[in-house]
Image (spheres, rainbow, N blue to C red):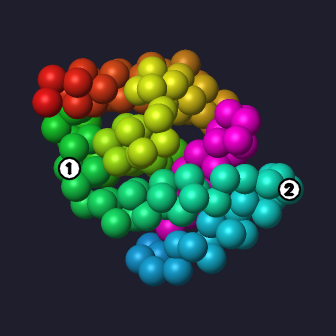
């Protein structure tokens, strides 16, 4: 599967997390994802998408807690919603999908930094990069 299709999946999952968090949707995230992925009008890797969605939504509380540990000066509620969505999905990919899909951690970091840059500004990119880099180092030390 071309990397560009995984990028689209990552973006659609991030948009889904953003929408569900913003609207308070606790269930039904698969329908939200399916609506979001249709906007891209491409074939995509369904196993990767399903696993990324499940890893993110089934571990939201733990991922939010991990973000607060990695960026203690930023309570989760104070993080920009798009940055938070990018971090939640990026951390889920780093922690739960990297080995299964043979994704080097550096690729995950680069992808989510680029996504943050396309949705935000330079400070968003730097924040996402810093948190994900810290997570990468932590996972490598285990």
132 left or right, relative to 19: left
Whether 113 is drawn above or below 101: the answer is above
Q: How many C-alpha atoms fall within 10 Å of the one at disc 2: few (<14), some, or many (≥20)?
A: few
Q: Which residue corresponds to the image point at 40% horizontal and 57% vertical from the top-left? A: 56
User: Which residues are the magenta region?
Assistant: 1-23
Q: Is residue 114 above or below residue 11?
A: above
Horizontal placement of 132 versus 67: left or right? right
Residue at screen point 38% across, 39% down = 99
* Residue situated furthest right in the rendering: 41
In percent of width and height, residue 30 lies at 57, 73
Q: Position of residue 17 (x, y in %)?
A: 50, 59
| Distance (Cα) linking label 1 and label 2 | 34 Å
How crowded pointer 1 is (Cα within 10 Å; few <14, some 14-19, many 20+) is rated as some
* Residue sitting nearer the eye, 92 or 122: 92
| Image side of residue 140 versus residue 17, left or right | left
Can you say whether 10 is above or below 112 in the image?
Answer: below
Q: Are marks 1 and 2 in contact (CB under 8 Å)?
A: no
Residue plotted at (64% across, 60% down): 46
Badge 2 element: loop
Residue sitting at x 30%, y 26%: 136
**Lower sequence index among marks 1 and 2:** 2
Measuring from the top left, give residue 83's x and y in whole percent. Answer: 47, 40
Is residue 120 something one can see in this rendering? no
Does 31 lie within the magenta span?
A: no
Mark 1 or 2, which is nearer the eye?
Answer: 2
The residue labelled by disc 1 is 65
- Indicate whether residue 10 is drawn in magenta: yes
**Residue 40 at x, y = what percent?**
81, 53
Which residue is under mark 2?
41
């Amino acid at each position: 599967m071309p990397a560009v299709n995984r990028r689209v999946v990552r973006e659609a999952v991030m948009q889904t997390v953003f929408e569900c968090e913003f609207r308070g949707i606790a269930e039904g995230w698969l329908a939200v994802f399916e609506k979001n992925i249709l906007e891209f009008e491409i074939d995509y890797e369904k196993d990767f998408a399903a696993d990324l969605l499940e890893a993110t939504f089934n571990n939201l509380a733990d991922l939010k807690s991990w973000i607060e540990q990695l960026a203690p000066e930023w309570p989760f509620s104070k993080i920009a919603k798009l940055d938070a969505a990018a971090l939640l999905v990026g951390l889920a990919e780093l922690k739960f999908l990297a080995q299964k899909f043979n994704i080097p951690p550096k690729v995950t970091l680069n992808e989510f930094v680029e996504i943050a840059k396309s949705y935000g500004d330079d400070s968003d990119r730097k924040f996402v990069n810093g948190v994900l880099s810290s997570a990468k180092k932590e996972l490598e030390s285990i």
